[in-house]
Image (spheres, grey):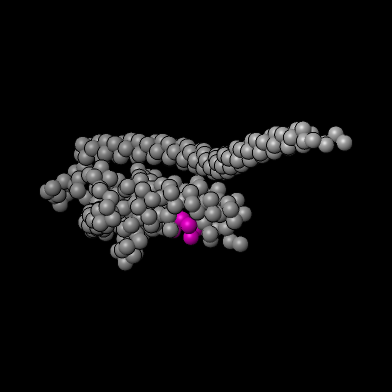
Amino acid sequence: MDVDADVDAVADELYGLVPARFTEVRDERAAKARKDGQAQAARAIAGLRRPTRAAFASNLLVRRRPKEVAAFLELGAALRRAHRSLDGTQLKDLSHQRHVVVAALARTARQLAEEEGQAVSESVAHEVEQTLHAALADPDAAEQWSSGRLATALTPPVGFTGLPAMAPVRPQPAVTRTEAPPKPKPKPKPTPQPSRAAEQRRARHEQARRKAEETGAEATAREAELREAERGQRDHEQALAEADARVAELERQLRGARTGRTEARRALAEATGRVRDAARAAGAARHNADAAADRLAELPGAQE
């Protein structure tokens, strides 16, 4: 028995449902797995989290628009390659394309969700856009998003995941060319001012790089704490689901016991009535027998 395959099949089913039906169907599937003796699968299913409205819209987009999703994932891979190679021209073109595609897909996701009766507010739409940006920037986020099983919206990282922290967005030579004197002369004489300006630019760049590294490390640490807290939350949700199942079973047994008690009381009352009626009949019969015996004794010749 492939437990992972069973859980995957249930997860695919659940994350295709509107959020309002998720918990009910999840609990039914977990109870069935538990009844079938699949305790591990039951625990895994019970631990699945109901998707937020933004996550539902994102999942719906992945499930309903596979071609657009494939093209979007290719765009993300191209962006990350351009970022690694420091191709400024390509980055500029792809960045413009990114904003256009993200906006279009976010509108599509919103429309699909509203067609399913799920209203999408501006804040939810913003979360969908953030999820799309995260999928472009981070290959791990892209894998999560493309599974169509998000429980919460994704947050784009500070920088592209997996790239050197000090990699600039544009090549340094381009910065140097833009800072060159506007009217060079055949025999220019270097002056200290451009060197100082260049040093100041490099110092500002280094300071910004260190700040980016620090904030990136801080964000990574907070994200790790978030994942740990989410794991703890899932454990507690699982424990609660199991406790709810035990309570439901005990309540079912209690209802059965109460029904049995009511039936026993009814049977006892009927038996008591029959005993009472029989006692009356026996008393009357005894009275009649005694009366008959008395009359017999009074008849002439009864003593002979």
* Count of numbered marks: 0
Report the side of 288 relative to 160 (left or right): right
- The residue at 35%/36% (across/down) is 211
Q: Quadrant for residue 158, please give it.
A: top left
Report the side of 241 relative to 174 (left or right): right
- The residue at 58%/53% (across/down) is 35
Of residues 279 and 130, the one drawn nearer to the viewer in this rendering: 279
* Quadrant where the image shows the N terminus: bottom right
Determine the residue located farthest toward the left in the rendered image.
183
Determine the residue located farthest toward the bottom in the rendered image.
67
| Residue 265 locus on image (x, y percent) | 60, 37
Q: Is residue 68 above or below residue 162?
A: below
- Is residue 119 in view from this perspective? yes
State yes or no: residue 9 in magenta: yes
Magenta region: which residues?
A: 8-12
Determine the residue located farthest toward the front in the rendered image.
300
Q: Main secondary structure of the magenta part?
A: helix
* Quadrant where the image shows the C terminus: top right
Q: Quadrant for residue 250, please give it.
A: top right
Of residues 242 and 274, the one drawn nearer to the viewer in this rendering: 274
| Residue 230 locus on image (x, y percent) | 46, 40
- Is residue 92 in view from this perspective? no
State yes or no: residue 189 in magenta: no
- The residue at 67%/36% (across/down) is 284
| Residue 118 locus on image (x, y percent) | 28, 50
- The residue at 55%/48% (across/down) is 43
Report the side of 2 relative to 131 (left or right): right
| Residue 271 locus on image (x, y percent) | 64, 40
Q: Quadrant for residue 108, please give it.
A: bottom left
